[in-house]
Amino acid sequence: MRCNVHKFEKNGVCKPCVEGMVCQHDDSVGLNITSLRVLRGYWRVNLHSETILRCPMGDAACPRQDSTCAPNYRGPRCDVCDDGAAKMRAGSGWTCEGCSH
């Protein structure tokens, strides 16, 4: 099934793209829930989820379109500092900085 521009397919139904989704179609492949990517600074639970959430730690924590966390970050929405990293103030937000041994 191929959906129109700014829509993706999930379980045979075309759904509208929401904030945080990358909704660019490839001419050879229709956009579906598992091929959908998220913008930098956004996160989703897994490839089957259509819920897109803003990363509270900012773009640095969620830099990839596949929702994996950046180094030193982990957890839902990449909002927890990894073991060996400390939460530090960075401008108006926060960052997780690796600790030196």
Image (cartoon, grey):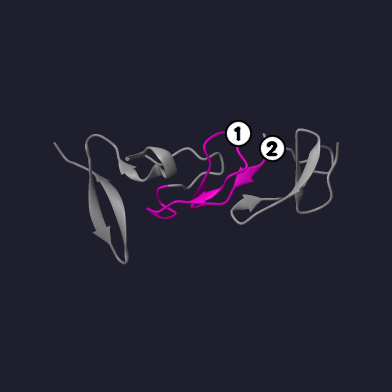
**What stretch of residues is rendered in magenta?**
35-61
Q: Amino acid at mark 2?
A: Ile
Location of residue 48 with respect to 70 vertically, above or below: above
Q: Position of residue 3 (x, y in %)?
A: 83, 45
Label 2 secondary element = loop
Which image quarter is the C terminus in?
top left
Residue sitting farthest toward the bottom? 92
Residue 26 within the magenta-colored segment of the rendering: no
In-image side of 2 versus 81 (left or right): right
x then y, percent, for residue 35: 68, 36
Q: Is residue 30 visible?
A: no
Picture quadrant of residue 8: top right
Identify which residue is drawn at 45% across, 47% down. 62
Which residue is nearer to you in this view: 71 or 48? 48
Which residue is the site of mark 2?
Answer: 33
Q: CA distance from mark 2 to mark 1?
A: 7 Å
Residue at 60 percent across and 37 percent down: it is 49
Q: How many discs appear?
A: 2
* Residue 45 magenta-highlighted: yes
Q: Are marks 2 and 1 in contact (CB under 8 Å)?
A: yes
Q: Residue furthest left?
A: 101
Report whether 33 appears left or right of 38: right
User: Residue 11: horizontal and vertical position, in percent?
Assistant: 76, 33
- Which SS does the magenta portion mostly show? loop
The three-letter amino acid code for the residue at tag 1 is Leu
Is 12 rendered above or below residue 19? above
Q: Secondary structure at mark 1?
A: loop
Q: Which residue is mark 1?
A: 47
Snapshot quadrant of residue 46: top right
Task: Please tell me how crowded label 2 is: few (under 14), some (14-19), or many (20+) other residues with Cα within 10 Å.
Answer: some
Asked if residue 50 lies left or right of residue 101, the reply is right
The location of residue 1, given as percent across then percent down, is 86, 36
